[in-house]
Image: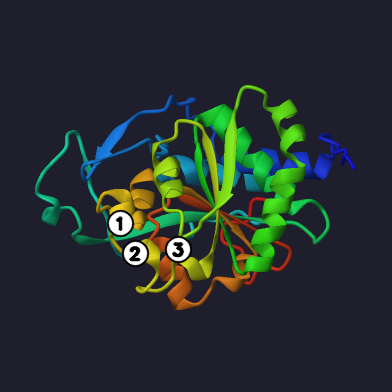
Amino acid sequence: MQFQFDPHQDFQLRAIQSAAGLFDGQPPLPSSLNISGGAAVIPNRLLLDDAALLANLQSVQRANELAVDERLEVIGDQLSVISEQSSVTTDRSTLHAPRSTSFPNFSVEMETGTGKTYVYLRTALELSLRYGLRKYIVVVPSVAVREGVLKTLRITADHLHSLYPGIPYRYYFYDSANLSLVRQFALSDGVEFMVMTIDSFNKASNVIRQSTDHLQGETPIHLIQAVRPVLILDEPQNMESELRLSALANLHPLLALRYSATHHNPYNLVY
């Protein structure tokens, strides 16, 4: 059975355009290879500063007749990251110093059954087309939700490729037994969707936090941090504990887009 998707649903288009409008003024950036701690990665880049993001947020909120926020809502924590280097260094001991990080959060509220997953997948491709953002981690609260996201990715593949024919993309779920996918995520110059459960990276004992021979001694989470992923949080009201907020910050994301019908904390609501 072949599913047919209508790409012209007004409420879905408005949600997509609202998220895309947050980055108005950013030029489409080509992929750029960086060396972080001796590892090659192609990261997301954002040229807009906080003032420009806030101005865009307020413009989107006014257009959607929402309350206008006076500041960006951020999540922050202490984390250990690999600093970006212009060349390979042999002194790896200096590359993991803890420092604070914070990232802005933007919320989209959509009722159950209105195509939330479809909207955020299409939003990611729109952001790639307009601005060159390529690396996305879809964070979900459970394995059941993860399987639902992967199913949507499968059944919308032909449809999304027809809408964005010039943007190849790959998708997969994070599997601690197949860490080569983390290397692929970090080094790819195309759009990558990595689907992860929050429990796969929220504890010190998680494989993602351990150095491994499978990555030539690299720690998977350090590769992810170097990429500066855009987080897509599916049902983020299930990720509000201190431990889970800390885990999200520890991915060192560029920003987070939050999608739910029942936000507990609607950080910077855009639609």
| Residue 10 to residue 67: above or below | above
Q: Residue furthest top?
A: 166
- Residue at the image point whose x is 59% and y is 44% from the top: 171
Label 3 and label 1: CA atoms lie apart by 17 Å
Q: Quadrant of the N terminus?
A: top right
- Residue at the image point whose x is 48% and y is 43% from the top: 53
- Say few, some or many: other residues with alpha carbon within 10 Å of mark 3 (under 14 / 14 to 19 / 20 or more): many
Percent position of residue 5, x then y: 85, 39
From the viewer's perspective, is the residue at label 3 or at label 2 nearer?
Answer: 2
The type of colouring in the image is rainbow
Percent position of residue 188, x then y: 44, 35
The answer to whether residue 66 is seen in the rendering is no
| Residue 241 to residue 217: above or below | below
> Residue 219, which numbered label?
1
Percent position of residue 87, x then y: 17, 34
Camera-side residue of 178 and 156: 178
Percent position of residue 16, x then y: 69, 41
Label 3 and label 2: CA atoms lie apart by 13 Å
Residue 110 vs residue 171: left or right? right
- Say few, some or many: other residues with alpha carbon within 10 Å of mark 2 (under 14 / 14 to 19 / 20 or more): some
> Residue 248, which numbered label?
3
- Residue at the image point whose x is 38% and y is 35% from the top: 42
- Residue at the image point whose x is 68% and y is 54% from the top: 149
| Residue 43 to residue 178: above or below | above
> Residue 209, which numbered label?
2
